[in-house]
Image (tube, helix red, strand yellow):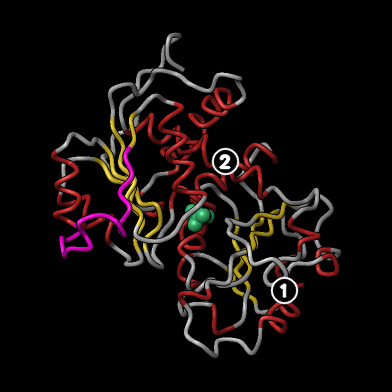
Amino acid sequence: MWNKKDLIGIKELSKYEIELIIETAVSMKEILKRTIKKVPTLRGRTICTLFYEPSTRTRSSFELAAKYLSADTISIATSTSSVQKGETLLDTVKTIEAMGVDLFIVRHSASGIPYFLAKNIKAGVINAGDGMHEHPTQALLDVFTVFEKKGKIDGLKVSIIGDIFHSRVARSNIYAWNKLGSSVIVCGPPTLIPPYIEDLNVEVTYNLDEAIEDADIIYVLRLQLERQKKGLFPTLREYHMLFGINEERIKKAKKDVLVMHPGPMNRGVEISSEIADSLLSVINEQVTNGVAVRMALLYLMLGGKSDENTV
Ligand code: CP
C-alpha cells in the first residue's frame, strides 16, 4: 500500500516502498512494449510539470508517463509565466492548484523547494531534482534497471564515480542502494567528495582502479560544471585521465559489469564514447525505464486501481 502524498527523497522511503515501486514498474514496462501504449488508469487526473532548471529526460518522461496513463498534463515554463512579473513560486503553484491540478512535478536549483511546496499545498509533489539535495526518481529508475539486468540488488557492489559533491543523483542513489542491501563506494578527486560522506554508509577512495575492481555497477556521474566554482581540478583533460571511464580503465572491471550514467553525458570527460555506446552500457535502458518507473509512481500516488480494464 502506498500512502504518501509526496515524494521528496529516497531518504524518506522504506525498503518496502522502493520495492513496491519496482514491482509496479515491471507491470508498467509491459504497457510500454505494446504498440498502443495507453491505458485509461488516470483518466480525469491532472499533472503539472514545473521546471525551474533545464531537463530533457526527467520532464519528457514524466509527461509521457502521464499521457500513457491517460492523465492530462500542463507544463509551466518559467520564462513565459507570471514568475517574470514577480509572482512568488508558492503563489504560482497555488494558482495552478486552484485550477484542479492533482500533482506537481517540480525541479528547482534550490534544495528544499519541493518540500516547502509539499507542506503548503494539498496536491501531491514529486521532487524532480532540487539543488544538490535529491533526485529520487533517477535513483528509482537506476535500481529498477539493475534489477531487470541482474535479477537482484542485494549484495551487489556499486561504485559511484565523479562529482559526488554537487550531485543530487549520487545522494539519492546512495540511499537507494543502501536500503536495498548493496554496498556503495564513491570515487573522485578529493575536491569533489563531500566531507562526512562516510556517514551515509559508503566507502571512499580517490583511486579509480580500486573503485572499479570487483564492482558490479560502475555509475558514472556528470561533471556538474554549472554548479562548480573554478579550480576544483586542473583541466577536463586531466580529469578524464584520472577519473574518466574509458576502454583502458574498464579492462580492470568485471566482465559483466554494468556501466550507468544519469545523463546528460559529457562525452570524453567523465566517460568515453566507446564505453557509453558499448554493450556494457545500460544508459539507454535507464532512459526507457525512467518512463516505466514514473508511470508506476503516478499510478501509486494518484490512487489508480489495477484491474483488467486498466493496467
Ligand atoms: N538525469 C536527468 O535528470 O536528466 P535531465 O536533466 O535531462 O532531466
Indicate the amino acid at tag 1: Leu
> Which residue is nearer to you in this view: 116 or 82?
82
| Label 2: how many Cα within 10 Å (few below 14, some 14–19, many 20+) | many
| Label 1: how many Cα within 10 Å (few below 14, some 14–19, many 20+) | many
Quadrant assignment, res 46: top left
Residue 196 picture location, percent across and down? 45, 77
Q: Is residue 88 magenta?
A: yes
Indicate the amino acid at tag 2: Phe
Q: Is residue 55 left or right of residue 187?
A: left
Q: Is residue 121 left or right of residue 134?
A: left
SS type, badge 1: helix
Q: Residue at x 30, y 49 (%)?
A: 76
Q: Given contact means CB atoms under 8 Å apart, are the residues at marks 1 and 2 in contact?
A: no
Please tell me whether residue 18 is drawn above or below residue 303 in the rendered image.
Answer: below
Quadrant assignment, res 254: bottom right
Residue 243 picture location, percent across and down? 70, 75
Residue 297 picture location, percent across and down? 41, 36
Q: Earlier in the sequence, mark 1 or mark 2?
A: 2
Label 1 residue near ligand 1, CB within 8 Å: no
> Which residue is nearer to you in this view: 3 or 91?
91
> What numbered label is drawn on residue 137?
none
Examine the rendering and report whether any part of residue 27 can be seen: yes
Please tell me whether residue 202 is drawn above or below residue 8 in the rendered image.
Answer: below
SS type, badge 2: helix
> What numbered label is drawn on residue 144?
2
- Between the residue at mark 1 and the residue at mark 2, the CA separation in whole angstroms equals 25 Å
Q: Is residue 53 magenta?
A: no
> What numbered label is drawn on residue 208?
1
Instruction: State the extent of the magenta-drawn residues as a range.
Output: 74-89
